[in-house]
Structures are given as structure tokens and as C-alpha cells.
Image: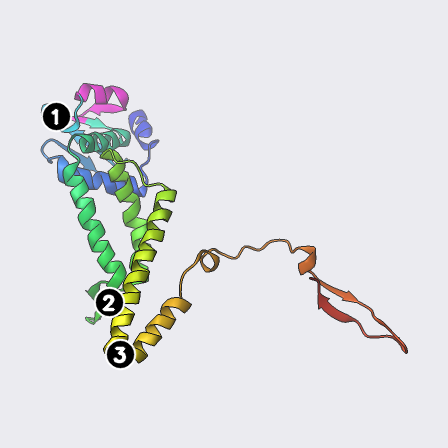
Amino acid sequence: MATWERFAAFELSDPEEAAVETVFSELIPEEVATWEWSEPVRWVTTIYDPVRLEPLIGIPVSDLIGQVDSFESGEGTVVSPEGTLMIAEFACRVNPIPILDGVIEEERKCREKTKRGESYTSHDGQQRTSDPDWEYRWYLERYRPRHELLRGWCGHRAVTMQERLAAAEAEVQRLDVLIARLIDQMKEHEYSHFAEIMERVHEEERITAANYRPVVDRPLKPSEIPVRYERATALGVSPLVSITGS
């Protein structure tokens, strides 16, 4: 029981779990090693054939076992979730191409879904299309963290926030030029009314830093606080008047 308790002390995050499943599916044959998703501890791995596993992960299995908790079972060596994570990461270092190809293909599919949604059959048998905005949020929540983790395991440095910002600004400029060309073409081919609508919508609904960032409640400046004052008149004092300082 003490061994299982030590195993349980190491928990994988959701992106790590998804990444491990991807790597084992692509790079680790089931007859060599398999991860387990069951009680009492999830994400332990049983190593059946250490000789065949070693070239797949690039290190001796004895070195791996020396770094993590493990025990011998009737079927093979059982390593902790930490060992499972290490096997996946080492396997990516040895053979990164299948993993990177899979990431690229998944991102291509995600881009299509975030543009047009995905057609599906609802529970009542109706053909429907998912909302592209929902698909984009799902990509940010589920796909991108796993993709970044897999890229890191394969030796690619994670994309920085500054790089994302620079790429986003360059992409906006590219799309602005493309949209302008399309609108000009529509105007030249008797679609001027629709072109004007699209041009106006594109400009009025533009997402900028000013309208994207959340409005945060904060203390008001003295100049922003409404004030009240009394103004003397020839007949006495006027009623209270409310103004905003400037």
C-alpha cells in the first residue's frame, strides 16, 4: 500500500494525460509497455519488454527505474505516473517526427473548425453545425496546451507571448490587405452594396486592445467623482446642483 500511496502523490495535469496517451498510441507498442487508467492509481505503466523499450526511449530501463518509484509484478515492472511521463517525453526525443506530424495535422483541422464550425448529427437526428467561436475556445482549452507540451518534448521551444503577439499583428495586416482586395473586386463586379456592408462591418467590429481587455473596477480619480455644490444667487441659495468634476 505504501508504494501505491507514493504513486498517487504524483498527479498528471489534463494536458499531460492527453499528451501521454498520444505518445503511447504512436510510439510505444502495447506488447512493450502500456499505461493503465484504473484504480487504485491512474497512469501507471507496466513495462513488459525492457529490452525493446530501451531503444524507443533512448536510455536503459534501469536508469529510468532508478529515478522513479516502481515495483515488480507478475507481468513486468510497474512504474509510477512520473515514470509514465518520463517514458513519453524520452520517446518524443528519440522519434519526434510522427508526433510533430500529428500536431500539425490536428492544428490544420482545428483551424478549419474555428473558421466554419463542424457539421454533426444532434441527438434528435438533426444536422447541425457547431459555432466557430466555441470551436476556438475548445481549441485553446484542450488542444493548444497538449500541442505545446508535445512540441516541448520533441525539442521545440515553447512559443513566447511576444512571438504570439507579433505573429497575430502580422496576420491581421495580411488579412486586412486580403479583405481590401476582395472588397475592391466586389465593387468592380456590381456587388457594391454588399461590399460596402462588409467593409463597414469589418471596420466597426474590429477587435482592438481597447475593446478586448476587460473593464476592471478601480477607485475613481478625484476628477471623476461627482460633486455637489451650492451657488449663491441674488435671492438666496439655489437648490443643490450635481456636476462631474473635470
At a point 35% along the width and 75% down the height, the residue shown is 197
Q: Residue 162: give x, y in percent of width and height.
A: 38, 43
| Quadrant in which the C terminus is drawn | bottom right
Please give the residue where the numbered disc 2 appears in the rendered image: 129
Is 188 or 205 nearer to us in this picture? 188
Q: How many marks?
A: 3
- Under tag 1, what secondary structure? helix
Please give the residue where the numbered disc 1 appears in the rendered image: 55
Q: CA distance from mark 3 to mark 2?
A: 28 Å
Which numbered marker is on residue 226? none
| Mark 3 neighbour class, 10 Å CA radius: few under 14, some 14 to 19, many 20 or more | few
| Mark 1 neighbour class, 10 Å CA radius: few under 14, some 14 to 19, many 20 or more | few
Q: Of circles 3 and 2, which is in front? A: 3
Span of residues in magenta: 60-77
- Relative horizontal placement of residue 98, taking residue 1 as reference (left or right): left
| Residue 118 seen | yes
The question of residue 66 being in magenta is answered with: yes
Which numbered marker is on residue 191? 3
Q: Earlier in the sequence, mark 1 or mark 2?
A: 1
Q: Earlier in the sequence, mark 3 or mark 2?
A: 2
